[in-house]
Amino acid sequence: MSIINSTASNADKSTASTTSTLTQRLTAAICASILGACLVYFAGFSHIEAVHNAAHDTRHSSAFPCH
């Protein structure tokens, strides 16, 4: 009986660590997406000419409307 209980205990621990890792990955992906979107729209619609011109060719080559 102790072998069965030990195996069940190990399975519970691995499931818990996988869930927390998945949660951390999902949180990091969401934060990175929000940061990326903010940077793209800040550069695309900025009234500061230096910021706007810094990535001008890249925006046009990827069909980002900045004018």
Image (cartoon, rainbow, N blue to C red):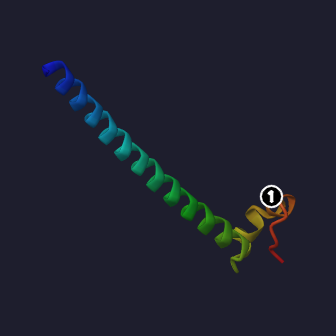
Q: Is residue 46 above or below residue 21?
A: below
The percent coordinates of residue 40 (x first, y second) are 67, 66
Above or below, comparing residue 17 to residue 52 in the picture: above
Q: Is residue 32 left or right of residue 8?
A: right
Residue 30 horizontal side relative to residue 13, left or right? right
Residue ID at (51%, 59%): 30
Splitting the image into 4 quarters, where does residue 41 fall?
Answer: bottom right
Query: Is residue 60 left or right of 18 when viewed as pictured?
Result: right
User: From the viewer's perspective, is 61 left or right of 13?
Assistant: right
Label 1 element class: helix
Assign the C terminus to one quadrant of the image: bottom right
Residue at the front extreme, as displayed: 1
Quick one: label 1, few (<14), some, or many (20+) residues within 10 Å?
Answer: few
Q: Residue at x 18, y 19 (%)?
A: 3
Q: Is 45 or 7 nearer to us in this picture?
A: 7
In the displayed orientation, state which residue is furthest to the bottom. Answer: 47
The quarter in which the N terminus is drawn is: top left
The amino acid marked with disc number 1 is Thr
The residue carrying mark 1 is 58
Q: Tell me residue 54's x, y (percent).
A: 74, 63
Give the residue displayed 31% in from the left and 34% down from the top: 14
Looking at the image, residue 6 lies above or below residue 36: above
Q: Nearer the viewer, residue 15 or 62?
A: 15
State how many labels appear.
1
Instruction: Give percent across and percent down for residue 46.
Output: 69, 76
Question: In front: 15, or 65?
Answer: 15
Residue 65 or residue 53, whichever sits in front:
65
User: Which x, y percent locates residue 20?
Assistant: 35, 46
